[in-house]
Amino acid sequence: MRRTRYRLRVAAVAAALTLMCALAGSVAGRVYHGQLLTLLVAGAALAAFAIGFLLRNRSAFLAPSASATGLAAYLLGAIALTSDGAEPLGATIADALVNAVPRTLTALIPVEPAPDTVIVPVFLTWLAATLACEFAIRYGRTLLGCLPPVLLYGAGLYLVGPNAAAGPLWAIVFCVLAAAALAVTAAPPERRPDRDAAVDGEAPSRAPALMGAVVTTVVLLAAVAVLGPAVARLVTASPGDPREYVEPPQLTDIDLNPLVRIAEWAKYPDQELFRADTSADAWLRLAVLTEYDGTTWQAAGDFRTAGTVIPGSGEATYSAEVEIIELGGKLVPAAADPAAVTDLPIAVNLYTRCLLTPDGLATGSTYHVDSALVTADRDAAANAGPDLSDATVVALPPGTPEIMATIADHVRSQYGTPYERAQGLADFLAAHYAFDPEAPSGHDLPALGFFLGTPVDLGGQRGTSEHFAASYAIIARLMGLPSRVAVGFDVPSGSSTVTAAQGMAWPEVAFDGVGWVRFDPLPAAGSVPTPPEDALEAMEEETPSADEESGGGGEAEDYNDDSLEQNGDFDAEPAEEDSGLPVWIWYAAAALALACVPLALKARRALRRRRRLARGSPAERVAGAWAEVLAASARAGVKVPAHANAEEAAARLAALESDIGPLPRLVNAAAFAPGAVSEADAELAATIAVGHSRAIRHHVSRWKRYLN
Amino acid sequence: MHDTEQTHPLHVPRRLQQPVQLGAPQAEQFAATFERLASAVDTVVLGKPEVVRLALTAMFAEGHILLEDVPGTGKTTMARSIAAAVSGQWRRIQFTPDLLPSDVSGVTIFNQSSGAFEFHPGPVFANIVIADEINRASPKTQSALLEVMEEGRVTVDGHPHQVPAPFLVVATQNPVEMDGTYRLPEAQLDRFLVKLSVGYPVEAAEVEVLRGTHQRSPEQLPPVVDTETVAQMAEMAKHVYIADPLYTYLVQLANATRNHPQVAVGVSPRGLIALTRAASVFALSQGRTYIIPEDVKALAGPVFAHRIQLAPDAAMRGAGAAAVVADAFEQVPVPLPASAA
């Protein structure tokens, strides 16, 4: 019967710890796509625990060996299960093993279960289950056995960070399982080991210990009350994210600025770039360029490895099946806003929502992309102000050509609202400049100045969509309109072959509450441009206003001024309120409080010793000396059980090689003979207790000396 | 069947003959007398000082002693030595299957000369009665000792007859030779304050026994104390101080034996009283006027073990009463003095 109960208890502990490990491992599954990772870690927990459990009565070295073998086999299976088969299994394994950790941390959420992203959680779960089994089943330390799954749970939460919703129910289940494992192995009260420890200072009277606990609790509560608010201010509302400390792979490539390809596409308009089968008319974006340094346009933000699901998108309303012909490069055409991409390894720029494939587009490669089509509401934009929340898209380099400021002033003088100005600028460029596929490529400031300001007979005022879009974006910024340049293709609905003629660049302007609105500054086909000089000279004849006296480019340069951000122009996060004391003082106070813990403990012990040895009647002081001797001996590793009498206790303490002389006799006299001990006896007992503590000091571990 | 009565000059300190006043000097006198008596018995029973002191403790606690061991280990010799060291009336009864109760307690016979019934006291009317091989008598005869062991009197034909004080029964029995024996009933076992096992002597003592250089017979042992001194020392033991926590400790020990899973019947209140009395004597024999837990632990085995009736399954598994007592001590925390902090 007893044996059956024992087996049931062991089985219950094993089941609870296995579930705890599976639960802890599956915490990471919250940021993974699908249920595959959850199944893999649950299987790892079960398999690892089963191996440890079956070998619990074998030699201690056998279990780790078998567990390591099982882990290798399980990882192999997991890699084979999640591999797409594009590369040989050996290369996949090697790549996954080498890059597992960085890719797990840099993969975009939801993480796609792939060989390199499942290894870490599976390995950690296996390790936790093995350790839990060894501690709890082989060595019977259930509490210690709970530690690996708890650490794994914490690691999982840290890995998830703020990227998934909280799971309080699973946390409760986890705690219940831990409590159950501890409860089924708890010793009955009469056999608990702490009964022996009760002699240590508590046996004489529980009141001092109770008082000590109360005082400690009060001190802790006071410390929490004093330091808590300050510490709470240091803690952000969202949990820490390890991805903040990891630098994602930098995908710097000339391919990131496809504006340079516009001229090529314009020159060879019949070049077949890719074949597309789409569900609707749409612009497939290749890149969105937001930063301009006077020479090139670049995309802000980093590309992060993503799975098949692109986070942050709405419901997919558009789909495209794409087969690459001669497009080349790494940028992947997709309609905004991409929601899912299959059949192609993808990295996504979270800032611009553009896609990239690290290995580049090869002829014949195909992929499928689903997008939540973004359609700007132009009616709303007509009444909206510019969206100045991002200083990047209004920043300009110094040295913008005078013609740009002139055009900006002209458009501003002609139109009132931001949207009218944006549309007016597009109309101005379309009316006064000509499209010329033979125009020389280039979008640096001198090239754009040549495009805008050089007379037609000298080769100016004609360009490709590269010149139109880049000029528009810069002039818009001069007018205070946030702008960017997009490069992509106009792809009709249905199946078609996209040629270079469909590739172009266009500007976009951001309106508050509306988003980015596309404008087309290109002249209509067959239209004849009028020279811009006429319109601009007519404007200069008018009386300059006070604003105009300040210079055309000055207004835009203001957006490069950091003070604008501090003035709240860009909805920047409010500056931290002056809380009175610098943060470092709170850190220093917290560190000081921690450093004072050993001192407080030592002071408490010294105070208790003083009370024990110097306060009360001689009999009480003898009893206090005895309590001191037992407490010191317990710290030195020799605990006296509660059922031991004074002589038996003295016999046990002999192991510490410290002679406590007549103290047992005095203790018995103090306890069981009224008035039998004198002041001299009490002093002798105190001397013995102090001497005993000193004599056995070398038996006490260093940390116990400080923390006990 | 009956040995002769023997008396010897007294060698008792004068202070012990005065009214009881228990202080440190009296305790030291008690301890000295106790030690002298034990040393005298030690000269006959070689190599068994602990057993001798336990037996003497039982005697001064006004309890009775059951000596159980295999033949030839000195049970009877020890009983006779204790009787010889105490100057008083002592008798020995060799228990046999045909022994009648009246052979123990005495009979009432009709005296033709006086024309009246007269009571002829049996051998139980002595200060020290050695009941040799007590388990060989029939239960009826064994029961003849029940009343006298508990109450110190014998009732014959409805008339109570007081036995002299002090009154001590030292019984012996052989645990291995069971043919023709009758196991002592629990009620009678409970009346023995201690049950002792003499055991084989240690090697050096056995060599001395063989050599015979210091061998003395019990009859050669001069009396060390008289019965009056024994009674006075027993009275002193009743004045030993017992702290309240120790009473609780004793009761918790008894409860631990009663609640032990291997026990059918635990220690009775009479056993608890017996332990208290024995511990009092033991404390005095150490020169103390108060009991400490060490006294209790030293005597719990001999006092408790024979009063514990094991459960049948536990007995069949070979469990022992001594282990039960040890378990009880491990379950009950020792009361310790309270400090001011």
Image: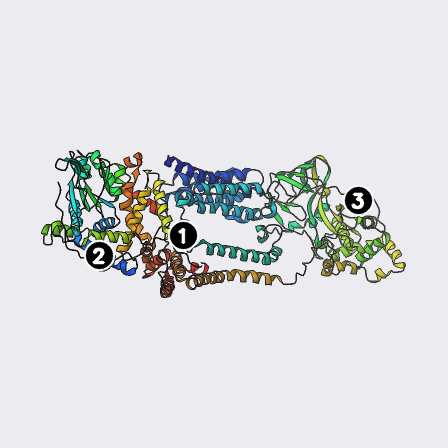
Residue A644: image location, x then y, percent: 34, 52
Q: Quadrant of the N terminus of chain B?
A: top left
- Could you tell me how far apart the alpha carbons at marks 2 and 1 are, in whole angstroms? 42 Å
Is residue A88 visible in this depiction of the protein?
Answer: no
Residues marked 3 and 2, same chain: no
Tell me the crowding category of disc 2: few under 14, some 14 to 19, or many 20 or more residues within 10 angstroms, Cα based.
many
Q: Nearer the viewer, residue B237 or A102?
A: B237
Q: Are marks 3 and 1 in contact (CB under 8 Å)?
A: no
Q: Nearer the viewer, residue A481 or B38?
A: B38
- Could you tell me how far apart the alpha carbons at marks 3 and 2 are, in whole angstroms? 117 Å
Kind of residue at badge 2: Thr
Q: Secondary structure at mark 1?
A: helix
Nearer to us: label 3 or label 1: 1
Residue under numbered circle 3: A380
Residue under numbered circle 2: B33
Residue B95: image location, x then y, percent: 16, 38
Q: Residue at x 36, y 66 (%)?
A: A680
Q: Horizontal placement of A245 versus A676: left or right?
A: right
- Could you tell me how far apart the alpha carbons at marks 3 and 1 are, in whole angstroms? 76 Å
Kind of residue at badge 3: Ala
Which chain does the residue under circle 2 lie in?
A: B
Which chain does the residue under circle 3 lie in?
A: A
Tell me the crowding category of disc 1: few under 14, some 14 to 19, or many 20 or more residues within 10 angstroms, Cα based.
some
Kind of residue at badge 1: Ala
Q: Secondary structure at mark 3?
A: helix
Residue under numbered circle 1: A197
Q: Secondary structure at mark 2?
A: helix
Quadrant assignment, res B40: bottom left
